[in-house]
Amino acid sequence: MSKKTKWGRLLLTGSMVLAVLLVSACSNKGSGSASEASLKIGTTDIQSDLWNFVRDQAKEEGLKIEVVTLSGQVDMNQSLADGDLEANAFQHIAYLTSWNGIHNSSLVAADTTIIAPLGIYSKKIKTVEEIKDGAKIAIPNDQTNLVRALKLLESAKLIKLPENFDLAKGGVDQIAENPHKLDIITAQSGMLPRVLDDVDAAIINNGVALEAGYKLDTSLFHENEEESAYVNVVATKEDILKDKADAFKKLNTVLHSDKVKEYIQQRYEGNFIPVTRTVNDVVDTFNKENGKK
């Protein structure tokens, strides 16, 4: 074999090795970028359709979302705190704040999603004015939504709460005025549609109402659609929000796009309302309204 032929083969082999290394390097670089622009988000069954749609739209922004649908028996905030999720989307800012306080945690709101106004529903009457003295009203028994229901009854001018009403510990026994002598009973949120036959009215969480076939526009009365405390948020941990800033920025673009807004309006027919306010505006307003810094 001539030296010329030998050197030619060595050059060819070297070029092939270099090409393989370059392809490998590019491949690794690409997988690293994909890893950075990804989020593992937990949600509920009632919101899974929305998040599957968001996931599909996010691909166009270069964001990979893994949607994890969890049952009501799973504490999604604990799953987030434990590192099983990178974010979750199922709760309003008031619930997140309450959960942090109870568990000495510091989960943060990364973005706004929807608001699902709480409503008063009935099979027996058509308006709030038809609620008679001594009427039996069922409300959720979990602390956050119990307080929320009492505030809704106050907004409907059916009861009056004390000025110093404790949002964290307040209950039915703290009602200041009950002029109609309403018989207010509590039940698990998921059971409220089933007790409608046995009560005059019930205050039902929007997601539960939707599952039971009740539309917000058929309620006797419902919350203000701009109520800051009950704006739903994407929750995460501070370190994840910092490390995955690009992923959350892409998520924000998708969540507040016209396509997602239109999907929410069509899919949930008014029970879920898309939120256009920024997360900073919602959190700041909530803190001011509740005396927090």
Image: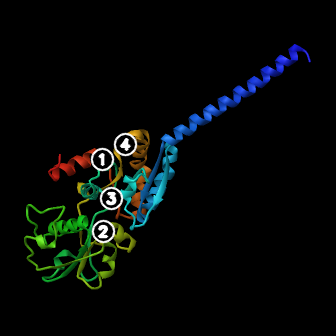
What residue lies at 14% left-to-right and 68% top-to-bottom? 154
What residue lies at 86% left-to-right and 14% top-to-bottom? 4
The quadrant of the image that shows the C terminus is top left
Sequence-earlier tag: 4 or 1: 4
Residue found farthest to the top: 3
Name the residue that disc number 2 marks. 205
How far, Cα to Cα, is label 2 from label 4?
A: 32 Å
What is the secondary structure assignment of the residue under circle 4? helix
Identified by mark 4, the residue type is Asp
4 or 1: mark nearer the eye: 4
Identified by mark 3, the residue type is Gln
Residue 206, image x, y percentages: 32, 67
Name the residue that disc number 4 marks. 239
Name the residue that disc number 1 marks. 279
**Figure check: 9 above or below 23:** above
**Figure check: 280 above or below 269:** above
What is the secondary structure assignment of the residue under circle 2? loop
| Residue count near mark 4 (Cα–Cα under 10 Å), binned few <14, some 14–19, many ≥20 | few
Sequence-earlier tag: 2 or 1: 2
What is the secondary structure assignment of the residue under circle 3? strand
Name the residue that disc number 3 marks. 91
What is the secondary structure assignment of the residue under circle 1? helix
